[in-house]
Image (cartoon, rainbow, N blue to C red):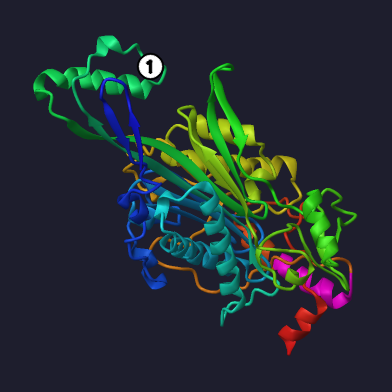
Amino acid sequence: MGNCVASGGTTRTVTAAGDGGEDGRRRGRRWKAPREEQLGSVPGRIFSNDGRSRTAGVFTQQGRKGINQDAMLVWDGFCGEDDVVLCGVFDGHGPHGHLVARRVRDALPLRLMSAVRASKAGLDMPAAAWRKAFAHAYKAMDKDLRSHATLDCFCSGSTAVTVLKLVCATRLDITLSFPFHPSTHPSSQEPMSNQFFLLDACVRPRTESRPLTSCFCAQGSDLYMANIGDSRAVLGSRDTAAGGMAAVQLTVDLKPDVPSEAERIKKCRGRVFALQDEPEVPRVWLPFDDAPGLAMARAFGDFCLKDYGVISVPEFFHWSLTEKDQFVILASDGVWDVLSNQEAVDIVSSSPSRSKAAKCLVEAATREWKTKYPTSKIDDCAVVCLYLDGKMDHERDSTASMDNISVDEGSVADPNETQEQEPALTRNFTVRTVAGSTHEKALAGAADAVVAGAAHDQNWSGLDGVTRVNSLVQLPRFSEEKAIG
């Protein structure tokens, strides 16, 4: 608590909620976190195309590689506070990547809640404390995957990009004492000081020189972000000079070609190089085997590489919002591989309605895949569009059912996952073998046949070759032997 005594006898007592106020210490700490089996019924939590949010639009679409390995989340009222929203996109890879991504989607927010409850400041902790909270949550999440009884994460993993939107309220307890004569006080350069003087001038004739104590709350919004892997968060902000929308990348794609990432991996005896048929995609390899060829430097799971430089420590970012900031796009690399940040922002800002913006972006990415990589298997796409003014229900189609929205020709939505149920365990063929034994080629051919058969009904004929490949190239030999045994 700080006291400031102005000339003329006016005393202002200011208490910042995040610095010592009782409410600030407990905001977000009293709410009881749900158990994992209760997550499906938590109000404000959506994770599928048929979910409804008051602040965000979401959409995910299966690619041409098998089951959709992307997962997404919007949690309105995170930690029991109406003005707090948590969003995330999680891109799985490997044989069980779809299960890893969904496990992270469900468990990571609970780990972050635990970190909030452990803090004396609760949700109103400073940015440095939020950095530690996210780091603790990500570490606990990776530990959870390592010890999971039924989920094999040895050669499967997931990226994660999470954004927490927090409205920080500063409580100002104001005590005004009299006599006070505004004419004797020149206008202050501080707008808030001017308001104190005006308030004093208005109430002085009615208070008969008795002190007045009041409270004023100033609000400001912040974004706290953490990410591992190559999923990305991009801000759409008004560009007053150009008269349009500007794209601001909020996170960094943590790929093996980032110098600091490559240095760490090499120090741990991991290898970083690209295959001849895809020189633009650097990968992480074991020191003793040309596997698994992971196309990212940080990820949950992938424990076959955790001793060789791949980590799950997130990069943390803090952004103080202004009135120019309009929305945040979270998307998996299925979007960013074919669309630039500015293109994505333009598509979202020009969407006919906010509830359709995420779907419009996914459909645009699908069209670009067909144009730029006609012989590639389209990647899974997941998008969350978080609107920073918190308004979704005023849109014309806010009450329309997503079931009545037609899917773009050639696109495949994920029919297995809804707000009511989880998909059954399905083997996913996401491993492409390099030139090797006849047995390996036969396995690859069988996997491609399954995918091609599933895509035949969609009239898609661009699967003859692969020019853009998967997050993993092949499983380590000892991993295959372990699976056979």
Q: Residue at x 51, y 37 (%)?
A: 320
Vertical side of 199 occupied by 373: above or below: below
Amino acid type at circle 1 is Ser
Q: Residue at x 83, y 48 (%)?
A: 280
Image spot of residue 453 (x, y percent): 66, 64
- Along the horizontal axis of the image, is 100 left or right of 16? right
Foreground: 384 or 418? 384
Image spot of residue 148 (x, y percent): 57, 78
Q: Main secondary structure of the magenta part?
A: helix
Q: Which residue is mark 1?
A: 188
Residue 380 seen in the current view: no
Foreground: 216 or 366? 216
Residue 86 seen in the current view: yes
**Quadrant housing the C terminus:** bottom right
Q: Residues within 10 Å of mark 1 (few under 14, many from 20)?
A: few
Q: Is residue 193 magenta?
A: no
- Magenta stretch? 436-449
